[in-house]
Amino acid sequence: MYGMYAEKERLIERLYLPLAYPRIAERYGVSLSPTLLVMGPPGTGKSFLLRRFAQGAGFQALWVSAPSLANKWYGETERHLRALVKTALKKRPALIVLDEVEGLFVDRSKNLPWLNGATLQLLTLIDALKEQGGVGLVALANHKNDLDPALLRSERIDEELYVPLPDLEERHQILVQASQKLPFAPTIDWRHWAAQTEGYSRADLIHLLKKAGRRAFLAHFWEGRPQLITDLDLRRAISE
């Protein structure tokens, strides 16, 4: 994965080490069920970062989109949450990743009674995990504005990690590495294109390369011969 070195290091320190070395963590008073709120704009790679981390760590990872847990039938959402935690406890050390949490665990003051039960159940389950240890929980969100304040308290969420849009150097790395498997012209100055794509997310940059590649793909058939992906393809892709 390109860039995000600080974010990867934080995941190792806050999630991997306490779960992999619980006796040492306990000696220093570190939580044996670390909890983390990972935030950032859409497309910055939050989900991909966590998937790669879980694969590398070797933990059992239970990945759930929070809105998919919602159920109109009374108590069903809470039942799904309890089953999720029960499964994770059986697979310790394990990691629960709740994606799009702002879509389910909303501030109870907003008077959405059909969601309040889910929020209360999650708070209860986090407290239970903290007591038992061996299961980390990561909540992914684009922002935390709508989350219930009780979820954000330090005794429940150990730390918040913000994943920003890539800076100039990270955009350059993403473009260089993501373009290697495609037939881009060797004359392309990727630093120039990194400068031209300020405000782009990782997903935006990958999509830009695919759009440019699609233009060259069509030109292959129009011209009747293989094509290189050129600066012109990138310029047209970025202007679309």
Image: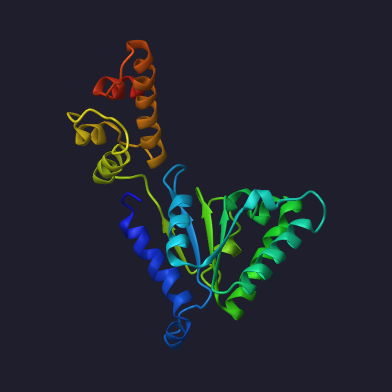
Which residue shows up at 30% across the image and 25% down it?
A: 234
From this view, report whether residue 235 is shown above or below residue 89.
above
Residue lying furthest bottom: 27
> Residue 210, located in which quarter of the rendered image?
top left
Q: Is residue 178 left or right of residue 67?
A: left
Which residue shows up at 38% across the image and 36% down it?
A: 206
From this view, report whether residue 104 is shown above or below residue 81.
above
- Quick one: 148 or 96, which is closer to the camera? 96
On the image, the x and y values in percent for residue 214 come to 39, 24
Residue lying furthest right: 74
On the image, the x and y values in percent for residue 161 come to 42, 59
Which residue shows up at 38% across the image and 40% down it?
A: 201
On the image, the x and y values in percent for residue 54 come to 47, 61
- Quick one: 173 or 163, which is closer to the camera? 173
On the image, the x and y values in percent for residue 221 come to 38, 14
Q: Is residue 144 left or right of residue 182?
A: right
Look at the image and tell me in which quarter the C terminus lies.
top left
- Quick one: 210 or 65, which is closer to the camera? 210
